[in-house]
Amino acid sequence: MLIKTPKETVAFITQVWSEQSPLSIMLWSEPGMGKSSVARAVAQELGYPTVVLESATIPPHELVGIPSIKDGRSCYGTPHWIPEGDQPIVLICDDLPHAPARSMGPFMSLLLEHRVGPHTLPKGSKVIATGNRVKDGAGAYTMPTAIANRMVHIEVTLDTAGWRHWGHGAGLAEDVTAFIGFRPDLLMKMNKAEPAWCSPRSWAAASELHRLGLPIDAAVGVGAAREFAAYVHLKESLPALEPILSGGGGQPPWPEELSLKWAVVSGVAFQARTVAQATAAFQYLDAYASAEWVSLFLQEVASRWGGEGRLSDLAVMVSKTPRLSEFVDEVLEIVA
């Protein structure tokens, strides 16, 4: 089985399907990793509309079509989920390992031949399934070998940087994306004994709760919520960051404590809305912080501006700031 990050998974499947391959894909992971979002991102890359089948709940007769008698012969009506016309689609079979045994028969031909009963998907359509492993305790069944052998399998693995980049573009609360940057080990921390635990999906829910001024325990659990609250309290105790962004006087001293350093870096990276502000923040960090913190700041700015489609602003910043250009060259030389 291939193991890839969500971004790598999108790129891999897009390449496969761009060559008009009929291969069906199966995405595996723990709950809450965003497999369905990956499937939709592939469809968007290809420019295909999506149709979602809830594999765990759709009954077999809705997969194949309602049977009837016509001219003395049995026939099956076209299922409601097969679109009219010849526009190819990306069919997402969500939670396929949760499907009951009686539904697996129709899925066999659907995955291999893009056909169910007498009905076929529009020519050029693609099929992608998602699901959890039995070991995840999510209620999934062991997938029949005949089903598994009809697909290419990819395990979608955790990608903290990629999730934070997505979070910036999706407008997640800055406190949440900053906290996960400080504590990446808490992005995914399953606790089967509790209903609320940490996952990319539950942190997105926590962002909504935090934005409403509500505690996030209900989304990510008590332990992670307490650590998040402590981080937010620490961040709120920082002196104002505006002097750093304006480049004027009254700039706060560079802190000693690790968590405070991260709070400053993530804070100015989030608040830097213009090239001038980001440049002033870079100059402050370049003067007082070590190179690793300057690099983290630039990564944060690139992630946020990239999520907003503003990477060209970063290029402008580099071109107009000789010291920044030198710093980038120094880092590249070290890496090389």
Image: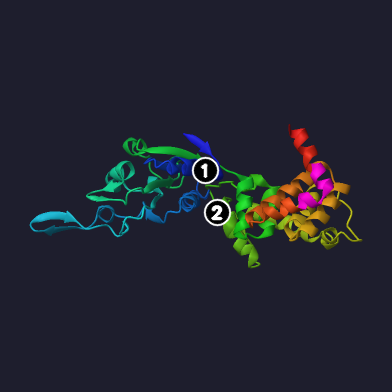
Q: Which amino acid does label 1 sit on?
A: Ala
Label 2 element class: helix
* Quarter of the rendering containing residue 58: bottom left
- Res. 201 mark: 2
Q: Is 39 placed left or right of 256 in the picture? A: left
Question: Which numbered mark, 2 or 1, is in the foreground of this view?
Answer: 1
Residue neighbourhood size for the residue with mark 2, other residues' Cα within 10 Å, grouped as few (<14), some (14–19), many (≥20): some
Q: Give the range drawn in magenta.
A: 317-327
Return the residue nearer the eye: 95 or 79. Answer: 79
The amino acid beneath tag 2 is Arg
On the image, the x and y values in percent for residue 289 come to 85, 46
Q: Residues within 10 Å of mark 1 (few under 14, many from 20)?
A: some
Gap between marks 2 and 1 measured at Cα = 21 Å
Residue 320 shown in magenta? yes
Residue shown at 68% from the left, 58% from the top: 174
Task: In the displayed orientation, state which residue is furthest to the bottom.
Answer: 212
Q: In which quarter of the image is residue 150?
A: top left
Which of the colour schemes (rainbow, by chain, secondary structure, one colour) is used? rainbow
Residue 239 - label: none
Q: Is the magenta stretch mostly helix, strand or loop?
A: helix
Q: Looking at this view, is 169 or 212 the one in front? A: 169
Residue 214 percent location from the top left of the image:
64, 66
Instruction: Identify the residue position indicated by label 1 in the image.
Output: 11
Q: Give residue 38's position: percent from left, percent from top.
A: 50, 49
In the figure, is residue 292 to the left or right of 166? Answer: right
243 up-or-down from 330: above or below: below
> Which residue is at the far left?
72
Viewer-side residue, 98 vs 303: 303
Residue visible at 55% across and 45% down in the picture: 7
Q: Mark 2–mark 1 contact, CB under 8 Å?
A: no
How many dots with numbers?
2
Let me know if residue 179 appears in the view: yes
